[in-house]
Image (cartoon, rainbow, N blue to C red):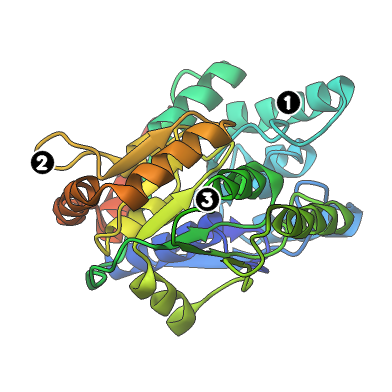
Amino acid sequence: MNTLLLVPPDTVPSGGNVYGRRLAEALTALGRPMHRTTVPGRWPWADADERAGLSRALARAPDGSAVILDGLLSCGVPEVVLPHASRLRLVVLVHLPLAEGAGLSPTQARDLDERERRVLHAARNVVATSRWSARRVAGHHGLGRVHVVEPGVDPAPPTPVGDGTRMLCLAAVTPHKGHDLLLSALADLGDLAWECTCAGPLGDLSAGEGEAAAYAERLRALCREYGLRDRVSFPGPLRGRALREAYSRADLLVLPSRKETYGMVVAEALARGVPVVAGEVGGVPEALGHDPHGRRPGLLVPPEDPAALAEALRRWLTDATLRGRLRRSARLRRERLRGWECAARDMAAILDRKEPG
């Protein structure tokens, strides 16, 4: 019997979208056919018609079949999900509690928390993409267990060694990704040679268009204020060949996020032997990991600290010995990364569990 995977619209490149697509492909390759279905809607703030669309998608699943639901899609609508909990083997894939960082009033946050809690406690199993996220969700919602299925990574050729001056930030242009922190840090490095490409879509599904546009304008104003317009570029989302070329030119990946469930771009950079400077938040330390000698293939800095980020980038740009050490560590870490087949086997084991939990 096919497993159904229900996900929100894949309108912009994101780690969550890539995770669902690649996991479905890997499970199918293992002989566990996965039918990935996009459910239109502005989730988790879907209207009545959009909620009805999710209800119809669940109703089409045969009794006893396994259905994996993206948490963004399902955790805000218990009235849609719970009627199917007794006849389907529901697995909810969560990243963070929905209300966290959503800019809601205390009353709205409590309501959304309660709705999400009802969905997660009704699910047969709950899955997160990092150990940190699993602990966060389990503690927040009083769950006995949240399983972990870390993202895989696709093999990639190693990036040629450059002079260290070409930095790449791959992230949606939203406040929690910390581009403003990065620009503030780069403003302190005007005496050094460097360039930085900030590639990613404007906004995401959880932010309103006005909010996303206002943040983008703020970043443009900071570039003008700091005199960075000739050194920092925002080319928008990159896919396919353009993304591969961006990685092939990069000496360093920079991820200044304020929050991050895992940080798939960290693993993607390491797959190419590219070191990382990132905020020490969420699951990023797990994604960065260690090489076989126990060394980090990058530098972790305190979140919300542009001065610490600037110091780490200055060290990278001025210390050839450090660059060499981090590059060697990244190449060694590259050899030990998990592929998508490993992620698919982990998910298959959860789907095959006879008892919930």
The residue nearer to you, when weighing 107 against 268, is: 268
Question: In this orientation, which residue lies closer to the viewer: 213 or 336?
Answer: 213
Asked if labels 2 and 1 touch by Cβ distance under 8 angstroms, the answer is: no
Which residue corresponds to the image point at 79% horizontal and 56% vertical from the top-left?
Answer: 221
- At 30% across and 46% down in the image, what residue appears? 346
N-terminal of the pair, mark 1 or mark 2, is 1
Going 36% across and 35% down the picture, which residue do you hit? 285
Q: How many marks?
A: 3
Task: Return the mark for residue 292.
Answer: 2
Point out the tag, 1 or 3, that comes first from the N-terminus: 3
Which SS class for mark 3? strand
Q: Secondary structure at mark 2?
A: loop
Task: Examine the rendering and report whether any part of residue 128 can be seen.
Answer: no
Disc 3 residue crowd, few under 14, some 14–19, many 20+, Cα 10 Å: many
Q: Quadrant of residue 31?
A: bottom left
Residue 83 figure quarter: top right
Q: Residue at 85%, 54% (x, y): give it.
A: 214
Location of residue 356 with respect to 144 vertically, above or below: below
Q: Is residue 171 left or right of residue 54?
A: left
Circle 1 packing at 10 Å, graded few (<14), some (14-19), many (20+), is some
Residue at the outermost left position: 293
Tell me the residue that label 1 is attached to. 113
